[in-house]
Every structure is written in C-alpha cells, then in structure tokens.
Image: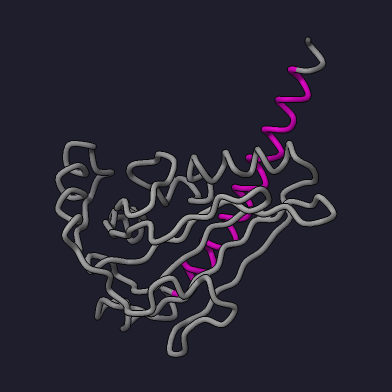
Amino acid sequence: MKISFKFPREKSLIPWLKARKQSQYSYPEHKATLDTEFPKGYNHDRNICQLGIGEKAFEAAKEAINQWVMFPKPWTHIYPAQPFVQDKEVVVLFRLFGLWWFNSSRIIYTINEPNRYGFAYGTLTQHVEKGEELFLVEKDAEGKVWYRLEAFSQPRAWYVKLFKPLARHHQKRFGKQSKAAMQAFVANYLKQQELTNTIN
C-alpha cells in the first residue's frame, strides 16, 4: 500500500506498477463474478443502469469502458487508462482525507461478445480491499443498452476494517457516480454523432 499527498506523476506510477507483476491475488475466489451468486463472507454490490437504445448506444458504451469512464473524476483515476488487456495490472488511485491511495488490481478475465463487452479485475496484495469487480455493458433483445457494475469485497487493511462503515459509504458513492459518468458519456457521444450527421 502506498499513499501520496499529491497526485502521483507517471515516473512514480511506472515503477510501482512494474513491481506488481509478481504480486498474487489477495483472495481465493477467482472469477467468481461470473457466477450468479457471489461468495459468502463478502459485501455484495450490484449496480445497473440503462445507457441508451440501439447499436450506436452500445458502441458508445464500449468506448466508455475502453476509456475507463466508469471511474468517476476527480477523486478516482486509473493508470494506465488504456483499453483493458487480460492479465495486465493497473493502479487504482482514489483520493480520501486529502491523500492519494495507490491500490493494485489485475484484469482477471474479459468479455467481448456481440452484445456483451467488459472485464473484471481482482485485487492484488497491494490493495486496501480484497475481492473482484465486474464492469460490463450489454445490449438486450429489445436493443436496450445497460451498464452493470458488480462486485464482492471485504476490507483487507486493518484501518479499513476499523472504519468499515466509511469504506462502504465510499463504495456506494463510487457505484452511484460510476453509473452517472457512464450515462453522461454515452449521451454526449450520441449527441456529438447526431451533430456530425446533421452537418454532413
């Protein structure tokens, strides 16, 4: 675990991320977000919201996932914020109590199907929580496009266990703002496309 008073520069993120390549997952229930029932003994979070209707909305939603839009700014950041790749590590940064907290996760599986797109990452040993989180967009039979944010987790660091109600508050906050960020991105994406088509 690492903290910083200032938003970390890339020169400090690169070596910290490289050091995580040898890290192990901090929980044993790998890929359990693929199951309908999450493991017992964890907090379970299931968030869902509609993003739009039709193929264009689905393409916008996929692009949002590629850009990690679901991490609400300015208090959360991902490094590197590049399209997800299985088995790659990422630094999950969040700001709390005036500090930037470094957390490490690894893409544990990906989904790239005609009507489903996304991935899940699992926490590594350098993370204040332990568990797994799924970020998924999907288009149903009626053409409606949905965003799903689902996770099972429990505190790993002693100070998170001590202030568990506060940690749960921020997890709920994250879920709410994540959905809003995805909805805003897709709406703006479709609006820009409509303006471009009108001009052309």
Residue 58 painted magenta:
no
- What is the residue that sits farthest to the front in this orientation? 113
Give the quadrant of residue 195: top right
| Principal secondary structure, stretch drawn in magenta | helix
* Residue 9 in picture, x, y percent from top left: 23, 38
> Which quadrant: the N terminus?
bottom left
The span picked out in magenta is 168-196
> Which quadrant: the C terminus?
top right
Seen at 27% across and 66% down, the residue is 124
In this picture, residue 133 sits left or right of residue 141: left
In this picture, residue 157 sits left or right of residue 61: left
In this picture, residue 100 sits left or right of residue 146: left
* Residue 163 in picture, x, y percent from top left: 35, 80
**Considering only vertical position in the picture, is 193 above or below 171?**
above
Give the quadrant of residue 184: top right
Seen at 57% across and 38% down, the residue is 63
**Considering only vertical position in the picture, is 129 above or below 135?**
below
**Considering only vertical position in the picture, is 9 above or below 102?**
above
Seen at 55% across and 68% down, the residue is 150
* Residue 17 in picture, x, y percent from top left: 21, 49
